[in-house]
Image: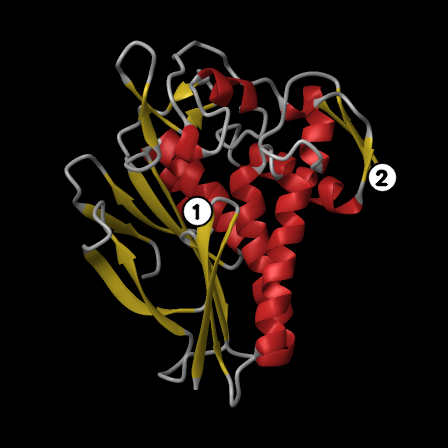
Amino acid sequence: MEFHDNFRAMDTDVDLFIVAEETPFAAFAEARLVFEQQEERFSRFRETSLLSRLNRGETVTDSWLAGVVEKAIDAWETTEGLFNPMILQALRTAGYDRTFSEVVGGREATEPAPSPKDCIAINGDEIWLRNGMLDLGGIVKGWTADIVGESLAESQTNVFVNAGGDIRCAGSDGGGEGWNMDVSGLSVAERVWEGRVSGAIATSTTVKRRWRTESGGEAHHLIDPRTGRPSRSDYVQVTARADECWIAEVWAKAVLIGGGRTRKQAESLGISLVTFEADGKPSFHGDW
């Protein structure tokens, strides 16, 4: 039988599906706990989080924080700087300085994000900032989907984790290899692809999480680190498919910001993509 659990975490809906013989109460409880622990560690909206302490100038010793920061630096290098965790100041300037439901105002300003290697110091599990401020929201959400999916699969085998569009799955829903799912277009009601998936999928979009700035213009949450302004590329939505969700999350964001050249780079690394321009027509790249 297929069992389902739903809860809020990291300012999004989390859905868990497990195929099992009986209700997996312990697995669902474990998943909720992991998401809460990760949010407590990494939310920039919690004053006591490891991330908030780091951004206030503290030296923090923690293996989880060091691990995800190393992933973020690796992503910055691999995407040639289009994924950059040092965009928090630009994000705040644009108006995203509180949970999204409360966002108002903000302004556009040219604030290129600094190099993470210049800003971040790591010595084993000890980490501190020389300059700038970190935002780890997207990569942590994808990584948490990976952690939960991998952990639950050890005991449950057939697991599907969806954290606000960051998806990690293992095993099968019983209908064949992998899990049946679809990719939405610019409208959630529009399906542009349906098939069976193993591994991970993530989507980045500028269609959602938009708000009015102080000048009456529109802003969104995907910052181009080259300018410090909300992205203005040809793509307005990108879905990426990879083995791990944090990798899919990184490349969905990088391709959305970087456009066609970055799409080709992602494809060369085996990342499958669905890209959308403003007309809403999907383009498929790689293995779908």
The residue depicted at 42 percent of the width and 18 percent of the height is 94
Left or right: 67, with 78 as reference point: right
Kindly identify which residue carries mark 2. 124
Q: Tag 2's secondary structure?
A: loop
- Determine whether the residue tagged by mark 1 lies in a helix, strand or loop: helix
Q: Earlier in the sequence, mark 2 or mark 1?
A: 2
Q: Give the residue pinned by disc 1.
A: 268
- For badge 1, the amino acid type reads Ser
Query: Can you give x and y, in whole percent of width and height, for residue 124 in the image?
Result: 85, 39
Q: In the figure, residue 72 lies in which quadrant?
A: top right
Quick check: can you spot residue 222?
no
Q: Residue at x 54, y 39 (%)?
A: 137
* Residue 225 screen position, x and y as percent: 48, 22
- Residue kind at label 2, given as amino acid type: Gly
Quarter of the rendering containing residue 275? top left
Distance, label 2 to label 1, CA atoms, is: 32 Å
What residue is shown at x 38% (from left), y 22% (from top)?
Answer: 104
